[in-house]
């Protein structure tokens, strides 16, 4: 379509340099004396819309406005210039006679740089000490992430490393147990493993939240069905078969006749029959043994208290000091609870709402607006709701989170029997599989990995279930159905970023790419890509270690941290080459001729901009380049 040689200064030809354009057979050179009117720029916005690209005064795709041109060929030139521009946009080039060459519009630097073999994190250990995970490791086969709780069974450096290699992407620190010093030691061990393997690991701090409990008894009592029982605020007297203290005036004052009170994880159930100053009377509907400090659940009321206790606030300060990546808030009831947490942490950490009360389910859309992610905490949720409602609620929450583009974890009792047994029940295996089929970003282990006899076996079993489900054609079909719905919504928004992200997924499917590679600073585009649930993994390249770590929770994303100085100092082709090599190192691509679909917002570091989409072999640009008309390889090596 076009070729250029020589150079021009400020768009004007000089005696020392000449510029010649060949446009559909018409020669345009320094012999022409009539300046070309502003023919090309006005057409740019229309062409931009056609190609889904953004044109601006600071980065014009074509600069020909001051180029001399014979006036009698103006009409033909208008047509030719439009065709040139379309071809350039399609190939990803910018043409500027001021430089006298056909350049990549995406070039980052004109300085020479030493080609990189692959990207590595600035926080990694020395190259000699970095351990590369084998490309055949099972952990690279899965898209659904794994969260493992650390505890007495898994708090050693050796076990943390072993669980990571087995597939754990996120380690959960349960602040309901242990001291801050113990949590800090665990964070340090996790970061050591992260540096050794040069792979970002996410840390989730789970705050305890308010725990409502009854007082103490003189001795264990047995409550019978149909009997009366009283809760009061008198903490000085020990309880008996007729009463016990409930040191929570907010509950006593809020309960009303016909409300439900559950004790000891729902084993005992009562109905409020009357109340007075500082007490409530109940009828025992389902009796049983009751002893000191058993938990209280009130599914029919919203308790007017903050979900952040003084202990939670102190733990939160420690968690921020330890630089964890996510903080989970327990017993969220309303959006204001998450807004309160957001006010305390700002943008220092991502926040996750644990949905374990019916009141939260009713206003989930509002809670989502203030949250970065959601956990389906089925333990307490199953206590306060009918068991047969929980699976339906779980599906609803997962679907809403996917529509919002925010990660969702399914948690509690997933492989409960593996606390004491090396294999799960068939029902437990189906439970994990159901969460994966539903499209959850992650599934979580609690007691199985924290205090069980078989933490490694539990992680491996969960990983095997994930891998088996994700190779099922039915699973891929379900992902596609949900994505068709999301794509229809995105197309209405006319957002260029949505268009490119949708295109990347479609192109990856069409060319059977090994992975999608996304350069990102804040992770927004990567999360949008994850929301689409592409059939291939997503490699997120970022200079922000915090971004890389929090992205490790989301479906299909494998982050790589790069020093910003490295990105700023290399040419685009070198960045593409290093990213391609990293895909091989991470095992996302197996062979040099495996194709990768790459996205970026250029110049690098520009937040909220995605304007680059390219197909590249995993062996790098030198293995295979998109063909271009004419011999342009000696013109610029950045394409």
Image (cartoon, rainbow, N blue to C red):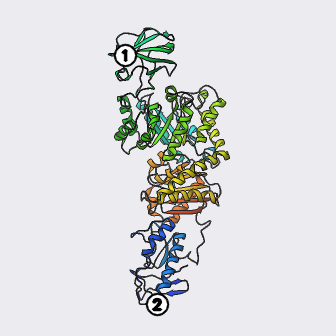
Residue at label 1? 275
Residue at label 2? 72
Residue 563: give x, y in percent of width and height. 45, 55
Quarter of the image where the N terminus is located:
bottom right
Please indicate, yes or no, whether residue 88 appears anywhere in the rendered image.
yes
Q: Are marks 1 and 2 in contact (CB under 8 Å)?
A: no
Dot 2 surroundings within 10 Å: few (below 14), some, or many (20 or more)? Answer: few
Query: Which badge, 1 or 2, comes first in the chain's sequence?
Result: 2
Please indicate, yes or no, whether residue 639 appears anywhere in the rendered image.
no
Pick the front one: 609 or 324 = 609
Residue at image location 41% in from the left, 90% down from the top = 33
Residue 603: mark in rendering: none
Instruction: Please state if 354 lies on the left or on the right of 588 as rendered.
Output: left
Pick the front one: 343 or 602 = 343
Residue 183: give x, y in percent of width and height. 44, 33
Q: Is residue 87 above or below residue 623?
A: below
Residue 49: give x, y in percent of width and height. 48, 67
Residue at image location 55% in from the left, 50% down from the top = 485
Dot 1 surroundings within 10 Å: few (below 14), some, or many (20 or more)? Answer: some
Q: Give the image quarter of residue 616.
A: bottom right
Residue furthest toward the left? Answer: 277
Q: Secondary structure at mark 1?
A: strand
Mark 1 or 2, closer to the camera: 1
Q: Secondary structure at mark 2?
A: helix
Q: Is residue 19 above or below residue 257?
A: below
Instruction: Please state if 368 lies on the left or on the right of 346 as rendered.
Output: right
Pick the front one: 62 or 314 = 62
Disc 1 from disc 2: Cα separation: 97 Å
């Amino acid at each position: 379509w076009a070729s250029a040689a020589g150079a021009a200064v400020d768009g004007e030809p000089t005696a020392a340099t000449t510029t010649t354009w060949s446009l559909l057979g018409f020669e345009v050179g320094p012999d022409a004396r009539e300046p070309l009117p502003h023919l090309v720029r006005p057409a740019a916005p229309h062409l931009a819309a056609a190609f889904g690209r953004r044109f601006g005064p600071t980065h014009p795709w074509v600069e020909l406005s001051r180029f001399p041109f014979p006036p009698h060929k103006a009409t033909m030139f208008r047509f030719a210039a439009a065709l040139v521009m379309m071809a350039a946009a399609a190939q990803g080039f910018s043409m500027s006679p001021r430089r006298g060459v056909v350049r990549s519009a995406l070039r980052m630097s004109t300085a020479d740089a030493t080609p990189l073999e692959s990207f590595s994190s600035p926080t990694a250990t020395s190259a000699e000490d970095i351990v590369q995970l084998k490309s055949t490791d099972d952990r690279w086969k899965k898209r659904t992430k794994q969260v493992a709780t650390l505890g007495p069974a898994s708090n050693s450096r050796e076990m943390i490393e072993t669980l990571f290699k087995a597939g754990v992407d996120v380690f959960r620190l349960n602040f309901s147990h242990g001291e801050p010093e113990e949590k800090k030691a665990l964070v340090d061990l996790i970061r050591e493993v992260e540096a050794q393997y040069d792979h970002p690991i996410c840390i989730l701090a789970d705050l305890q939240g308010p725990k409502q409990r009854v007082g103490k008894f003189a001795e264990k009592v047995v409550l019978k069905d149909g009997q009366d029982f009283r809760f009061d605020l008198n903490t000085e007297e020990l309880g008996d078969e007729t009463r016990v203290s409930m040191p929570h005036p907010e509950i006593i004052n809020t309960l009303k006749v016909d409300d439900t009170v559950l004790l000891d994880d729902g084993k005992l159930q009562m109905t409020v029959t009357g109340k007075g100053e500082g007490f409530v009377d109940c009828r025992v509907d389902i009796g049983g043994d009751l002893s000191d400090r058993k938990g209280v659940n009130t599914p029919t009321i919203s308790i007017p208290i903050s979900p952040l206790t003084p202990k939670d606030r102190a733990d939160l300060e420690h968690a921020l000091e330890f630089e964890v990546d996510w903080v989970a808030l327990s017993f969220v009831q309303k959006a204001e609870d998450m807004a309160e947490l957001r006010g305390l942490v700002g943008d220092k950490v991502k926040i996750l709402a644990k949905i374990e009360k019916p009141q939260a389910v009713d206003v989930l859309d509002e809670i989502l607006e203030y949250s970065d992610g959601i956990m389906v905490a089925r333990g307490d949720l199953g206590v306060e709701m009918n068991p047969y409602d929980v699976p339906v609620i779980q599906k609803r929450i997962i679907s809403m989170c996917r529509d919002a583009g925010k990660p969702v974890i399914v948690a509690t009792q997933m492989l409960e029997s593996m606390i004491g047994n090396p294999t799960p029940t068939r029902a437990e295996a189906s439970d994990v599989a159901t969460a994966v089929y539903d499209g959850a970003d992650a599934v979580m282990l609690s007691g199985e990995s924290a205090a069980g006899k078989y933490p490694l076996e539990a992680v491996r079993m969960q990983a095997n279930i994930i891998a088996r489900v994700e190779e099922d054609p039915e699973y891929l079909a379900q992902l596609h159905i949900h994505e068709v719905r999301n794509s229809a919504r995105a197309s209405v928004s006319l957002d260029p970023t949505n268009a490119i992200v949708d295109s990347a997924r479609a192109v990856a499917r069409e060319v059977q790419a090994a992975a999608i590679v996304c350069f990102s600073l804040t992770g927004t585009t990567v999360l949008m890509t994850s929301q689409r649930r592409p059939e291939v993994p997503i490699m997120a390249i970022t200079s922000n270690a915090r971004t890389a770590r929090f992205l490790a929770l989301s479906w299909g994303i494998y982050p790589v941290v790069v020093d910003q100085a490295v990105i700023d100092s290399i040419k685009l082709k070198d960045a593409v080459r290093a990213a391609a090599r990293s895909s091989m190192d991470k095992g996302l691509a197996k062979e040099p001729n495996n194709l990768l679909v790459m996205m970026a917002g250029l110049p690098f570091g520009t937040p909220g901009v995605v304007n680059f989409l390219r197909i590249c072999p995993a062996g790098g640009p030198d293995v295979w380049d998109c063909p271009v008309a004419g011999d342009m390889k000696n013109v610029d090596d950045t394409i």
